[in-house]
Image: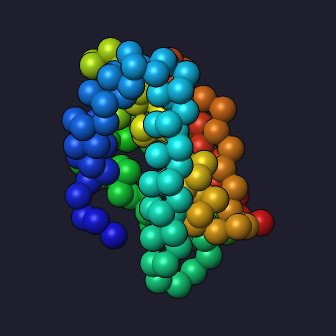
Amino acid sequence: MDQLPYLQRAKIQAEILLPLYRRLKLEIGAERAGALLREAVDEFATALGAEIAAQGEGTSLEKMRTAFRMFMADGALVLEPVAHTETELSVNIRGCKYAEYFQALGEAEFGAMLVCGIDPPMTAAVGSGLSLQRTRTIMGGDSHCDFCFRQA
């Protein structure tokens, strides 16, 4: 997998996609522009999940635990562990440089689509027995993100 910290990848992606997204909103409307961006993010995230799934041995949850480090690189996330068992990885994220970056741009909604939006399709592509439950995100204005990955 790419060794570039994911926060840096997200910033690079945003340099191109944000101006395109803004133009699309003007040309075809916010609803259609958002739908197109979500489709592209889903495609990207599914490929990323497949890449994670192809890494080494172990369960899908073990692979996700390892991959999670990519998203944490350079102190991008401040984690509060909740559960760490053979079948569950639950954390609350109390600090998020991704959210700080997109909120500072005034583009939290775009950031949520680009960054937070990868989580469900990526998780599904890592393994059919792996699930993700997340009900809150800092990007969405909540005090924290609540991630719960479970291995069936």
Any part of residue 66 in sight:
yes
Q: Position of residue 135 (x, y in %)?
A: 66, 32
Q: Which residue lies furthest to the front in this view?
A: 27
Q: Is residue 28 left or right of residue 71?
A: right
Quadrant where the C terminus is found in the figure: bottom right
Q: Position of residue 13 (x, y in %)?
A: 28, 43
Q: In this view, does 138 lie above or below 89?
A: above
Total numbered labels placed on residues in the image: 0
Q: In this view, does 101 lie to the left or right of 27?
A: left
Q: Position of residue 113 (x, y in %)?
A: 48, 34
Q: Residue furthest bottom?
A: 57
Q: Is residue 149 above or below residue 92?
A: below
- When asked about the image quadrant of residue 88, the answer is bottom right
Towards the viewer: 46 or 30: 30
Q: Which residue is drawn at 59% across and 37% down?
A: 146
Q: Which residue lies furthest to the right in this view?
A: 152
- When asked about the image quadrant of residue 89, the answer is bottom right
Towards the viewer: 110 or 129: 110
Any part of residue 81 in sight:
no
Q: Residue at x 62, y 76 (%)?
A: 59
Quadrant where the N terminus is found in the figure: bottom left
Q: Which residue is drawn at 22% across and 35% down?
A: 15
